[in-house]
Amino acid sequence: MQEMLPDQSPNIFTLRRGTQEVALPNACFKRIVWRRSAAFFFDMLILIAMFISLMILNVATFFALSGLLTFLWPAMLFMLYDTLLIGGRGSATIGMRLMGLKTLTRAGGKPGYFQAFALSILFYLSVTLTSGLVLLIALFNNRGRCLHDILTGIFIVNAAPCPTK
């Protein structure tokens, strides 16, 4: 016979904004790992399409863009995409918006461009250096947070049931 232990996690997760507290219900984190994975897949499709378009444009202009399309160009394209969209008004990439996700800071507001840039750099570095194994942290975290989220103070939450600043 299997013994069931009571759920010890609180129904409300609280973010501190100065002296105020922002309460986030558990619905903000429901199925977050699956949604983040699907959002990443959509974002990669968009980024690959952008890169292929640039390669076609390079061929069409008789390789005039070859200087820009070096080894670092795809990495810069990926980081710019994440930084501009996460740090921007919507505080989510296109894939995240398709999956109904948004980013919040520890204070409950939207992240700025610097914080989004740090998130992007830490994400791509950690995934590259660990062959993606670092993302398994999200499976063992009750809020679905990855290492780069924890280090930058960002929460990825479901957009619909969560309040913002």
Image (spheres, rainbow, N blue to C red):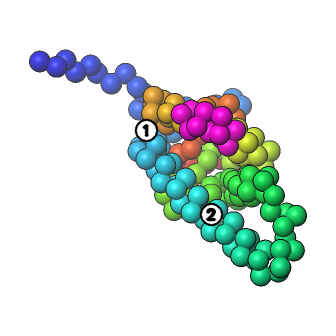
- Residue drawn at x 62%, y 57% as measured from the top left: 93
Q: Amino acid at mark 2?
A: Ile
Residue sitting farthest toward the left: 1
- Residue drawn at x 70%, y 38% as measured from the top left: 125
Residue 38 appears at what percent x and percent y? 47, 54
First-in-chain label (2 vs 1): 1
**Where does label 2 land, which residue?**
48
- For label 2, the crowd category at 10 Å Cα-Cα, with few meaning under 14, some 14 to 19 and many 20 or more, is some
**Where does label 1 land, which residue?**
26
Q: Is residue 115 above or below residue 72?
A: above
CA gap between label 2 and label 1 equals 34 Å
Quarter of the N terminus within the rendering: top left
- Residue drawn at x 46%, y 43% as measured from the top left: 33
Magenta-tinted stretch: 123-134
Residue 128 appears at what percent x and percent y? 65, 39
Left/right placement of residue 116 relative to residue 144 reads: right
Query: Helix, strand, or loop for circle 2?
Result: helix
Q: Is residue 77 magenta?
A: no
Query: Along the line of sight, which residue is nearer the eye, 39 or 7?
Result: 39
